[in-house]
Image (cartoon, rainbow, N blue to C red):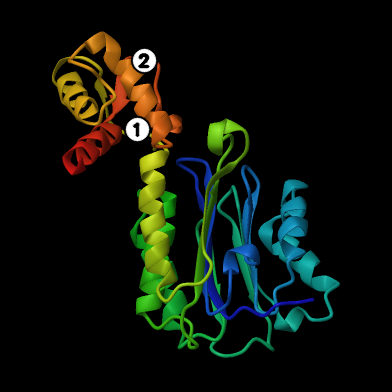
Amino acid sequence: MAYRPSTFSIVAWDADHGELGVATQSKFLAVGSVVPWAKAGIGAIATQSWANTSYGPRGLQLLERGAEPEEALSMLLADDPQRESRQVGIVDTKGRAATFTGSDCFAWAGGRTGPGYACQGNILVGEETVNALAKTFEATAGEELAERLVRSLQAAQAAGGDSRGQQSAALVVVKLAGGYGGFNDRYLDLRVDDHTQPIEELARLLKLHKLYYPRPDEPTVPLHGEGARELGAGLQKLGYLQGYDERAIEDALRRFSMTENLEERLRDDGRVYAAVLEYVSMKAGEA
């Protein structure tokens, strides 16, 4: 059975960090279960408007076999009798992009591509929504891919968005060994399935993700000296440390991290992420 989410989306490639991502919003329940598809080192795909969800895995297979996005798109559409009802965006790891909007998609519907991205939407207030996706993504070059994608959604919504309103949003970012524990490529997979302001809720979830998962080049401080004293004071107040003892701080921090689901932020080099230190201080202040 085909589904017809009225949707806007952006698929993108970040060459600096080897990340691929998809961000989408729709007046449709759980858009993240339909539209976004991505595989690290291969590409990212958004399939929407009477979405043919087979386009996701099949398109990624075609990219993996060497097809360029335009070629993969042509092959997906070729044997689909309902292709004029489809809307698709594809990007690969060379920054090549393609977008397609069938002639039967409900207005306003269309797409736009640029270096490393494709954006598209249907049943929109107007073309301004897709233009805002593209302009914001281009203007935020150098920032983290997940941030760029969410900011692009926010700008698109401010420019008019889906003419029927809002309901769900999703953000997927993949990179090699980027998932929990490094066991898969699912670096970030956030979904807001039913909400009056799904994009803003997605932005809130992204902030939480930043707490639980470290970012490249994120600042750290040593587990001795001033940083250790501040950390020790916080852990004492929270009941994880009895008296100040630098030698016991690492164990206390480990127990705190396991309790707070911060295990992905544990280090074994005698340092602590500055964000973790701030979080301990915040929790101690609330205690």
Front residue of 76 and 4: 4
What label sits on residue 217 in the rendered view? 1
Residue at image position (46%, 79%) is 166
- Is residue 62 visible in the rendered image? The answer is yes
What label sits on residue 269 in the rendered view? 2
Which corner quadrant holds the N terminus? bottom right
177 sits left or right of 222 in the view? right
Front residue of 144 and 265: 265
Residue at image position (59%, 47%) is 93
Please provide percent x and percent y for residue 270.
32, 15
15 sits left or right of 211 in the view? right
Residue at image position (72%, 53%) is 60
Outermost residue, top side: 247
User: How many residues crowd mark 1 within 10 Å: few (<14), some (14–19), many (20+)?
Assistant: few
Which corner quadrant holds the C terminus? top left
Identify the secondary structure beneath mark 2: loop
116 sits left or right of 246 in the view? right
Identify the secondary structure beneath mark 1: loop
| Mark 1 vs 2, N-terminal side | 1
